[in-house]
Amino acid sequence: MNVVQLKNISKSFNQSLFKRKEILTEINLNIQKGEFVVLKGANGSGKTTLLNLILGLLAPTQGEVKLFGENPKSFHSKIRLGVVLQKVSLPKNLTVKELVNLLRSYYPNPLSTEEILSTVNLKSKENNWASKLSGGEEQRLFFALALAGNPELLILDEPTRNLDEEGFIEFWEQIKICREKNITILMVTNNQADFTYLDNLVTKYVILKEGKLEENIIKTVLVEEKESSKFKETNRKINYTYLLLKQTYAELLQLVRTPLYLLGIFLLPSLIVLFPMNQKSAKVMLIFFCGLMLLILAIERLGKRIAIERVEGWLKLLKVTPLPPSVFFRAKIIITLLLSTIILSLMFIFGAFKLGIDEYLISWLAMFLCLLLGIIPFAIFGLAMGYLFNPKSLDSIVGLSVPFAVLTCGLPISKAKWFSDLIDFSPVYHYGQLVLYSANIKNDNNIILHLVFLGIFSLIFYLVSIWAYKKDQSLN
């Protein structure tokens, strides 16, 4: 059975508007079950591009890629796969044990956390911050994450990089065990020390030279194919609820472990004390301030986090796991809504007691729900921006969102008809009218129209975020 199959694969990238550079040319490669294949080549020969194609992180310009006979992006191929990548930074606010628990939750047939940590000799470090490990310990953890799902195929990109002598020996002991278990391995390495072990384990060397492939078969391994319980596990369905709970919990842990960020966010409601005490104007200003703060938070929180995790390589690692993008997106949005709920509650408390705004409970509830649910389109917009721009650019986008919101929210800034016609197509305008309606403040009373427009914008931004997720220029 071919675990990896490449048919006439070519890959090129845009160098300029009218010029493309071909990185790989008509690559054909089959890796059978139980093989140990080493991919060699000089820097710039296309090794990383080839791995990204096999992992489904890039699409070929022409040709076909199959993992276990399926699209490499499919859930059923990813649950059999374990990967060690280069240039990945670990989340800053999760411990080693928490990170292993999170990754193993993505798979239907994972190894136990204790077995994983013992395998890479990190049991004594399980309560340490993953991001604070030494270079060698971090590399061990990456190998642990690759083993978490009990894989049938390991793809290892420079796996011995930064390992100390003890870690290096332990790694190769584990590779020997993987060979005994008939796990297929595809490895990229430039570490000459690796070849002392490879010569006794490798079944095939694959050499890339100027985008073309040469094979050097060392020995043939005949594998008796038989149906195994692990193969049957590939028919399992995705438990979206379980994955969402685990991913949301991990996001929540990272949020509560950033006290300075939370302190700054929770101090924002205190600005309400600067508002005038007049009941009518105070209510309008409170609603305007709440809407503006939530809009900025939705774009900044989601967009900035996505951009940072993307640049650090963490999202690239998540892409090769079975975690569905929809679950990842929902977990991010849930945490943003939770944070927004707390901030909005604080602002309403200030409004009620400090400004003396007197409203029935049902009125407070209506305003609360409209303010909170109305930011969902902007949260989804933030997701898309996070995949399209780097963190510094996101700061500029957040900054520009403030004047944009003020200009298009419906305030009587200009009487020109063209201007009023233009803001009809602003999601901020429809958000503002929805909130004004809930607060029983002068509005155009077209509540259904505003809900429809916000729904349309949510759909558009969602489609853009999916497109941006697939496009993700950081991989190129």
Image: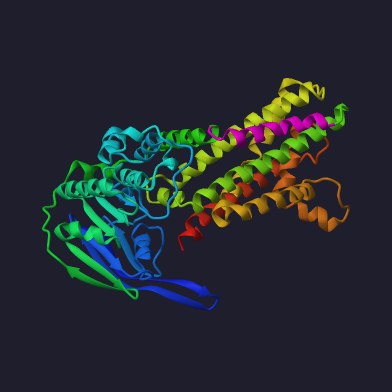
Residue 252 horizontal side relative to residue 242, left or right: right
Residue at 24 percent across and 62 percent down: it is 38
Percent across and percent down for residue 192 are 26, 62
Looking at this view, name the residue that lies furthest to the front: 165
Left or right side of 340 for 221: left
Colour theme: rainbow
Tell me where residue 411 sits by quadrant: top right
Q: Is residue 373 magenta?
A: no
Q: Name the residue nearer the viewer: 287 or 473.
A: 473
* Residue 236 shows in this picture: yes
Tell me residue 308's x, y (percent).
53, 49
410 to 67, vertically: above or below: above
What secondary structure is the stretch in magenta mostly built from? helix
Quadrant position of the N terminus in the picture: bottom left
Residue 463 locus on image (x, y percent):
55, 53
Image quadrant where residue 123 sits: top left
Front residue of 258 and 284: 258
211 sits left or right of 251 in the view: left
Instruction: Evaluate whether residue 3 shows in this view.
Output: no
Q: Residues in magenta? A: 257-275
Instruction: Determine the residue located farthest toward the bottom in the rendered image.
Output: 18
Mark count: 0
Residue at 86 percent across and 27 percent down: it is 279
Judge whether 135 appears above or below 99 on screen.
Answer: below
Image coordinates for residue 302, horizontal then vertical, percent: 58, 44
| Residue found at x 60% / y 42% | 301
Residue at (18, 46) in percent of width and height: 177
258 or 374, which lies in front? 258
Please, is residue 379 above or below residue 28 in the view? above
Please give left or right for residue 40 compared with residue 379 in the image: left
